[in-house]
Amino acid sequence: MAPGYFADIVVFDPQTIADKATFDPPHQYAVGVKHVFVNGIQVLANGEPTGKAAGRFVKGPGAK
């Protein structure tokens, strides 16, 4: 990480992290994830969404 760069950071508990989504209820958050920062903006705090949207659209070489 360095000033001017973009970084995503996830703080999680390796003892409790698990994906809870299944085919029946597919839209469930993983457990054990404590904090998520996207481009330096906290989007998950203490396991709860902050309501902030910080992602960026990234074009690949095939984009027109």
Image (tube, helix red, strand yellow):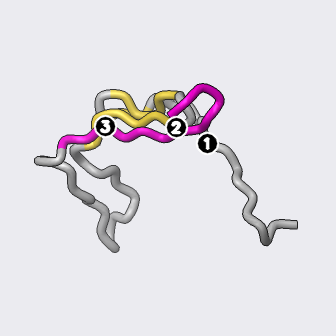
Viewer-proximal residue, 27 or 60?
60
- Residue 15 image point, x, y percent: 11, 47
Give the x, y percent position of residue 5: 61, 35
Give the class, few, some or many, for how many residues have Cα within 10 Å of label 3's Cα (few <14, many ≥20). Answer: some
Q: Quadrant of residue 22?
A: bottom left
Circles 2 and 1: CB distance less than 8 Å?
yes
Q: Residue at x 42, y 39 (%)?
A: 9
At 35% across and 33% down in the image, what residue appears?
35
Q: Residue at x 36, y 28 (%)?
A: 45
Q: Magenta stretch?
A: 1-13
The residue indicated by pointer 2 is 38
Mark 3 lies on a secondary structure that is: strand
Cα distance, mark 3 to mark 2? 12 Å
| Residue of label 1 | 55
Between marks 2 and 1, how big is the CA–CA gap?
6 Å
Say which residue appears at 20% left-offset and 50% top-offset. 17
Tell me: 60 left or right of 1. right
Name the mark on residue 11: 3
The kind of residue on which mark 3 rests is Val
Front one among 3 and 44: 3
Q: For this rendering, which residue is in front, 23 or 58? A: 58
4 displayed left or right of 47: right
The numbered mark, 1 or 3, whose residue comes first in the sequence reads 3
Picture coordinates of residue 62 (x, y %)?
79, 71
Residue type indicated by callout 2: Val
Majority secondary structure in the magenta region: loop
Dot 1 lies on which element? loop
The picture quadrant where one finds residue 54 is top right
Give the distance between the C-alpha atoms of the residues marked 1 and 3, in whole angstroms. Answer: 17 Å
